Image (cartoon, grey):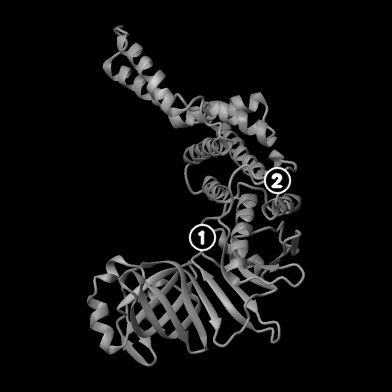
Amino acid sequence: MKSLDRYGEAIVEYEGVAEITFVEESGTVYKGYFEAKQMRTGGIAVGFVPVMNDEDNLTDSTTLEFYSPTFHGVDADNWELTSIGQTSRVPRIGFFGAIGSVAEPALVFGASRLKARQKGATESGYLKSSFLVSNLIWHLGRSVPNPITLETDALKVTITPVEDYLETADSIKAIRGIDPTARVLIESPGDRRRSMEEYAEIMKNVVSIFRLTTGNKVDWYYGEALADSSALVVERIHKDAVTGPFSKTFRSGVNIPLLRGLMEAFFSDCYKAIGQEDLTKLIDYFVNVCDETSYLEARGLLASTLADLIGQTHAEAMDCQNVMEEEDFNTEILPALQAAISCIRIPELSDQLRERAIQQLRGAFRHPFRKRLYLLAKKTNLPLSPKDINRAVRIRNELVHSGKFLSENREDWYEEYRFIVWLDFAALCRLSGYDGELSRSMLS
């Protein structure tokens, strides 16, 4: 299999016969040969060669430029593969070797997910499923860490280091990739069975917990489930994984009580201040805040922007984001304020400054950052004193308006950055429903 080699080294690969369907074109189906690979870089690439009577139609079709195909194939080892979610065109390169022939692929695309199931498998659900996870590091010193078991009423999660954990942990800090550091086993309680898609959805939340507690771009890329009778793998799922640099923002190791508390909060019916989708997006943003490859000022600005966004998202969820309704402000208050500014006639107030002042009034119906922080701390029991809130506001304003930290002493900048990162971290823990200790010593 050589046609996809230029996309990178494969960690799992399939080859066989397939059908490509363009749903947007009334279900037009093309039959041919395929190869599919999950790359070490995290992506999933699929190459397709049509049978001879379809080749001209597929190659010349403008459909390829505008529509995403769905894919179904069977490989030589009887794995039935189906693309799940979005697919996207990628540049066509190289040659495609399929079933002994050599041909240029008419279509190469990337898939967000690829499901593989053994042909003839009868299982409709599984008692457990395991996933390979990259960029999760939780050892201290040079000892392989112990497994971690997290249990709630809804599930049991066991995190076990891979065999070559220490070597992978050393290399992952310098090289981006999805080399696994851990295997995560998810077990359902009693005799409850879940589909692979349900286990993958659980892993989405588990990954969010790992990202929040480590500040790293932890992600899963491969999952599998076993048949009860044979203990053989009968279903797999591959995901286009996110990779990124390793962050040292948090101390080495994982805070187990925090991890357990967050697991309980994520997978229970406890109160959550915002929706799960918003929480996941904010945690993904938090990982970018911890990315140490950018300038400290840029990270500080990201951290401050996230704090503002967290406050705004929480205020909207509580329906207390505004001082008054925007429509009422625009009709009753704003015109009078604009007229008052327009009437001011002093030499120091240029037309440019007057217009800038008028523009800044347009958002005056919203609560300011300080008020949103106060509401956040009060509603979620966030350990922020009035002095902390004042410091956060001053740091945020200086970064947003001047692009620099508050202190003139460069040595104090990292401490200011750490303070805003801790604020983001603590706020996200509270918004998830976690009510335990939030010590600033959790950051390095």
Disc 2 to disc 1, C-alpha distance? 27 Å
Earlier in the chain: of badge 2 and badge 1, it is 1
In the picture of the structure, the residue carrying the numbered disc 2 is 434
Coordinates of residue 14 in the picture (x, y in percent): 47, 82
Q: Residue at x 40, y 69 (%)?
A: 110
Coordinates of residue 367 in the picture (x, y in percent): 52, 27
Give the vertical position of 371 relative to 246 (above or below).
above
Task: Report if residue 215 is visible in the image.
Answer: yes
Residue at the extreme top of the image, as rendered: 346
- In the image, is 86 to the left or to the right of 415? left
Give the vertical position of 370 relative to 442 (above or below).
above
Give the vertical position of 310 relative to 1 (above or below).
above
Q: Quadrant of the C terminus?
A: top right
- In the image, is 250 to the left or to the right of 5? right
Q: Quadrant of the N terminus?
A: bottom left
Q: Residue at x 54, y 51 (%)?
A: 284
- Dot 2, crowdedness within 10 Å: few (<14), some or many (≥20)? many
Q: Look at label 1 and name its amino acid.
A: Thr
Coordinates of residue 378 in the picture (x, y in percent): 67, 31
Which mark identifies residue 243? 1
Q: Quadrant of residue 233?
A: bottom right
Name the secondary structure under disc 2. loop
Q: Nearer the viewer, residue 147 or 112?
A: 112
